[in-house]
Image (tube, coloured by chain):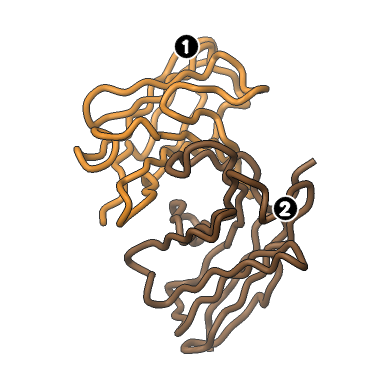
Chain colours: A orange, B brown
Amino acid sequence: QSALTQPRSVSGSPGQSVTISCTGSSSDIGTWNYVSWFQQHPDKAPKLLIFDVTTRPSGVPDRFSGSKSGNTASLTISGLRAEDEADYYCCSYAGNQIFWLFGGGTRLTVL
Amino acid sequence: QITLKESGPTLVKPTQTLTLTCSLSGFSVSTRGVGVGWIRQPPGRALEWLAVSFWDDDEHYSPSLKSRLTITKDTSKNQVVLVINNMDPADTATYFCVHKAYGSPRTPKFDFWGQGALVTVSS
């Protein structure tokens, strides 16, 4: 099975908004509303930001939002802050045979 | 609060078997609706989901590694163990165990992560 496709890197200035895409197929993102997003700072464990496409766990700022259109899910970070500089990963349910797939990760640079 | 901690060897030789243990605190492996999974990350590379064991004994494996993986629960010790056979240098990675939160078994709601355990495969 192939990993979900994410841009290798994105960047933005403080205060701006950035969107990270996660492209899958009709077998995963296109069919199921089970997409999560994770943030990972260097040498740290990932942190859950979004689950079920749009839901934020308690404690995650509303600057982080998720959406989906067709086979592509997106994470939007508004009001960029320096501490948002990190790697971001999407993960989707992909049916009972594959179960879960991760994206290749996106490095966010805050300029 | 919920915590998970991975333990196991830091160095294994090619062809050897790796056994990793995830010790759980703040919840039970038998807690209704939850799961415990394993995810790995080679140095400088992306996350890769490996396996999950649910409260009701349901299990799932990554198809690409299924033939080499076994996940088991030890209810008495409140631990989840992952065994990987025939280790290869390409298996060098940080291995994370994760708490999959209550809800649909399909949603990858990994809300608590262990600190990770770096395993190097080298002769």
Q: Quadrant of residue A25?
A: top left
Report in which chain the residue with disc 2 lies.
Answer: B
Q: Say left or right for B68 vs B3.
A: left
Q: Which residue is drawn at 57% across and 79% down?
A: B18
Quadrant in the rendering for residue B110: top right
Q: Name the residue under label 1.
A: A16
> Is disc 1 in the same subunit as disc 2?
no
Q: Which amino acid does label 1 sit on?
A: Gln
For label 2, count other residues whose C-alpha is less than 10 Å away and answer few (under 14), some (14-19) or many (20+).
some
Against B16, is B5 above or below? above
Residue A63 at x, y percent in the picture: 54, 14
**In this picture, residue A14 sits left or right of residue B112:** left
Q: Where residue A15 appears, x then y in whole percent?
A: 53, 10
Q: Which residue is drawn at 64% across and 64% down?
A: B80
Residue nearer the viewer, A83 or B56: B56
* Mark 2: amino acid: Ser
Q: Which of B57 and B78 is in front in this view?
A: B57
Q: Mark 1 lies on which chain?
A: A
Residue at 42% from the left image edge and 22% from the top image edge:
A66
Please tell me whether residue A16 is drawn above or below residue A32 in the rendered image. above
Cα separation, mark 1 vs mark 2, equals 42 Å
Helix, strand or loop under label 2: loop
Could you say where residue B111 lies in the image, as x and y percent from the top left?
A: 61, 39
Is A73 above or below relative to B106? above
Task: Read off the residue under disc 2.
Answer: B28
Q: Quadrant of the N terminus of chain B?
A: top right
